[in-house]
Image: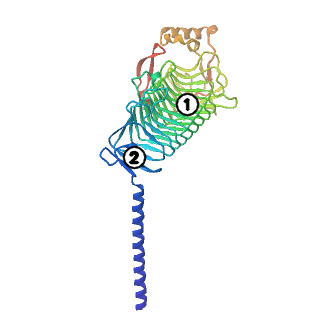
Amino acid sequence: MHGRRFDARRTLDLALAIALALSLLAALVGSASADSAAPGITVCPSCPTSSIVEALAQVPAGGRITVRAGVYRGQLRIDRPVQLVGIGDPVIDGGDQGTVVTISAPDVTLQGFTVRGTGTSLDHEDAAIAANGERATLAGNRIEDALFGIYLRNAHGSVLRDNTVSGKEALPVGFRGDPIRIWYSNNVDVEGNVARGGRDIILWFSHDGVLRDNVFEGNRYGLHLMYSDRAQIEGNSLRDNSAGLYIMYSNGCVVSGNSLTDNHGPSGMGLGLKGDDDAMVQGNRFVSNRIGAQIDESPHSLTAHVTITGNVFAYNDTGIGFLPNVERNTVAGNDFIDNVEQVAILGGGQLHDISWTVNGRGNYWSDYVGFDANGDGIGDVSYRAQHLFESLIDNHESLRIFLFSPAVTAIDFAARAFPEVRPQTKLVDTAPLIRPVVPPGLVPGPRLAIRTRLVGGRSAFSRRSEAWQ
């Protein structure tokens, strides 16, 4: 009996010893991990290392430099994989000379800085941050007074997240650089950034990019893609640009859940598609633009298609404008609400091979005058766009000066009274929706604000709901 008690006590003591050893080992491992995660070099005005240039010369590849608040003047060149992390908003000031930060190595992180004061040479493409290495991570930076803001070249797999970029707004637009320019850089993630006051946010020859939850406003092109296939453009706000989003010669792009508002100018539009195959435009809102969406030579290939569905086109001068050579477009399940002209044929002519109805459901048209006798939500009479004055302005843009004048009423009354001058039918939607199909989060408010603006050099009125903005 005593032997059993002795063995039990020895077993308990052994177990406690093992537990204590494991606890000590875990503490040692945690301490080592904490040491390894600690910054390799700390830079601050009063630290032993007070220069970022000096720290870059000392840090090993894969190391970390923590930079505390202060103003650090001069240009930086990062030629090895490092993490450069700012604490307390340190400032890198280029002194209005050249490019401020040049990254030539892969796997570089630059986070938490204000970068300002580039040169003004368009020839040299002076930029706040120029990255030529793959997998760069640029996050949480503020870029000010920059000709070009962030410039990626052959920087595949890079991430731009939560940066704010403002250009040299004192310069004329043609002399400014691009807030964000991405060149030959595939699989780039651009998310949560704000860019304003520059020329264009542009992707050239950069495939499989993701552009999500950004705010691009007050630029020439809010976002411009050329030869950049399979881009995912989601949840962005593109406002107060000359053109909100323009996609050229880029295949398989998806444009979803974006807000494109107040984009005006001589050729202003919310969205432009030119030479694009298999584009999907769904769940966006196009509000108070000169043209909500302009479709030109899209799709380009004979076997391709363009789908426009679930969008809201409201209070634009023109909801959708098609060039007469456009075919193989499906436009169904959209809301067309109080656009001055719901659909335009730019330059005149006739539309061919445009599908306005899918599976027995068409679009909602605010100017539909039919009825729904059986209550199934589908109009029993087709929606027909057939207005003489609209046909005239499609052929002669200068006639827009007469919009909202008594001449418009007189011309359209004459067209109804005298079949000899009745215009050809622009489009027929055989299953118009009685109620709008508004995407979630886009419910319009009950009040409309009326404002006057200049449209192509001529005065016109438009209505818009503040709740759509």
Q: As displayed, is residue 103 above or below residue 260?
A: below
Q: Amino acid at mark 1?
A: Leu
Whether residue 33 appears in this view of the structure is yes
Q: Nearer the viewer, residue 158 or 439?
A: 158
Quadrant in the rendering for residue 149: top left
Q: Nearer the viewer, residue 127 or 195?
A: 127
Residue 434 x, y percent position in the rendering: 54, 28
Quadrant in the rendering for residue 3: bottom left
Quadrant of the frame with the N terminus: bottom left
User: Which one is closest to the eye, mark 2 or mark 1?
Assistant: 2
Q: What element does badge 1 sit on?
A: strand
Q: Amino acid at mark 2?
A: Ala
Q: Nearer the viewer, residue 289 or 14?
A: 14
Quadrant in the rendering for residue 93: top left
Total labels drawn? 2
Pointer 2: residues within 10 angstroms few (<14), some, or many (20+)?
many
Residue 19 x, y percent position in the rendering: 41, 73
Residue furthest left as drawn: 46
Q: Residue at x 39, y 45 (%)?
A: 54
* Residue receiving disc 2: 55
- Relative placement, left or right, of 105 versus 421 is left
Q: Residue at x 44, y 33 (%)?
A: 99
Whether residue 444 appears in this view of the structure is no
Q: Which mark is residue 225?
A: 1
Q: Residue at x 49, y 10 (%)?
A: 401
How far is mark 2 from mark 1, CA to CA? 38 Å
Mark positioned earlier in the residue sequence (2 or 1): 2
Residue 279 x, y percent position in the rendering: 60, 32
Q: Nearer the viewer, residue 345 or 440?
A: 345
Circle 2/circle 1 CB separation < 8 Å: no
Q: Which mark is residue 125?
A: none
Q: As displayed, is residue 9 above or below residue 228?
A: below
